Amino acid sequence: MPPSVSITQDPGSACSEPEPPVNISWKPKRGSIKLPNIDLDALGKLGNATSNDTASTNAVATSSNTLETINDTLATNTNTLATSTDTLTTGADTLATTTTETLATESQFLDQGSTSSNLPD
């Protein structure tokens, strides 16, 4: 916004000619206004009406079916993963049981004392 300027004249001074008006101009700094590059041809094409032809409708339906197939595959993979996790849990239980039983047997053997008469065959 340009600043306002007021010019006053001393009433005691006589001047035959009025003073010329003061011209103030304001310009933005160079390069401060940037306009985006707009492809006017492409912009005009955006306004064109599109038709729902059978080919595009079928393509959308096929895409939906493909997504359903992918979802079914993901569900199958999730079930397989759950089965694998169950198998791992069962394996861990077996390992814990085997280790505990083996350690208990060895403890009993050590409690009895290791003599040549009670060594296992």
Image (cartoon, helix red, strand yellow):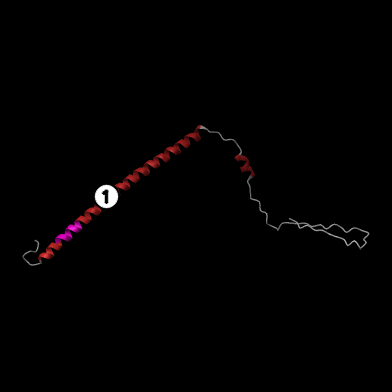
| Residue 19 place in picture, x, y as percent | 88, 59
- List the residue tagged with mark 1: 87
Q: Main secondary structure of the magenta part?
A: helix
- Is 66 on the left-hand or right-hand side of 29? left
Q: Secondary structure at mark 1?
A: helix
Task: Determine crowd level at label 1: few under 14, some 14-19, many 20+ residues with C-alpha closer than 10 A.
Answer: few
Looking at the image, is 80 positioned above or below residue 52? Answer: below
Looking at the image, is 17 positioned above or below residue 38? Answer: below
Q: Which residues are magenta?
A: 98-105
Q: Residue at x 30, y 50 (%)?
A: 85
Looking at the image, is 22 positioned above or below residue 66? Answer: below
Q: Residue at x 50, y 35 (%)?
A: 56
- Is 5 on the left-hand or right-hand side of 88? right
Q: Quadrant of the C terminus?
A: bottom left
Front-most of residues 104 and 46: 104
* Amino acid tagged 1: Thr
